Image: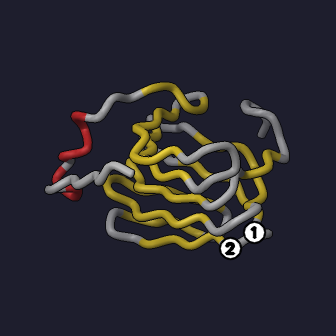
Amino acid sequence: MTELVIRGLLDGAWRHLRSEPFLAGVSVRWLHQGGMGAPKTAILEYAPGARAPRHRHAGLETIIVLEGVQSDENGEYPAGSLVLNPPGSVHSVWSDKGCAVLIQWDLPVVFLEAEGEA
């Protein structure tokens, strides 16, 4: 496995990494992609007003908010927040003004609604 070090993570040093579409209004910068069903680590960038549809976590998801504010049905999480979503938890995610988060998940989520549904 290749080591990855990003110095200045909180200062936006991750911005040099290649970005690609992930969900509508959300882009991803992959840090680590294991094989099918393996843990993954990435930086997700939510455009203002973007959201991830309601989904259930099959494994632990760990989020550190790097910039902006990420929200779900349980509250708002400003930069510097750590959010742990345990297996079986269900929520949708959005950002009114946009945000960037470092995210690691053990297993893929199960979407309970299609993109674009309220």
Q: Position of residue 53 (x, y in %)?
A: 71, 43
Q: How many marks?
A: 2
Residue type at the position of mark 2:
Pro
Name the outermost residue toward the front: 1
Q: Position of residue 27 (x, y in %)?
A: 47, 33
Give SS at disc 1. loop
- Image position of 42 (left or right of 109): left
**Is 41 situated above or below 47?**
below
Count residues near mark 1 (Cα–Cα under 10 Å), then give few for <14, some for 14-19, many for 20+: some
Query: Depth check: 75 or 45 in front?
Result: 45
- Image position of 99 (left or right of 10): right
- Image position of 113 (left or right of 68): right
Q: Residue at x 39, y 51 (%)?
A: 1
Q: Are marks 2 and 1 in contact (CB under 8 Å)?
A: yes
Name the residue beneath numbered marker 1: 89
Residue type at the position of mark 1:
Ser
Q: Residue at x 55, y 47 (%)?
A: 34
Disc 2 from disc 1: Cα separation: 6 Å
* Residue 18, image quadrant: top left
Give SS at disc 2. loop
Name the residue beneath numbered marker 2: 86
Instruction: Assign the C terminus to one quadrant of the image.
Output: top right
* Residue 58, image quadrant: bottom right
Q: Position of residue 78 (x, y in %)?
A: 39, 64
Name the outermost residue toward the right: 112
- Image position of 72 (left or right of 108): left
Q: Which mark is residue 99?
A: none
Q: Position of residue 111 (x, y in %)?
A: 79, 45
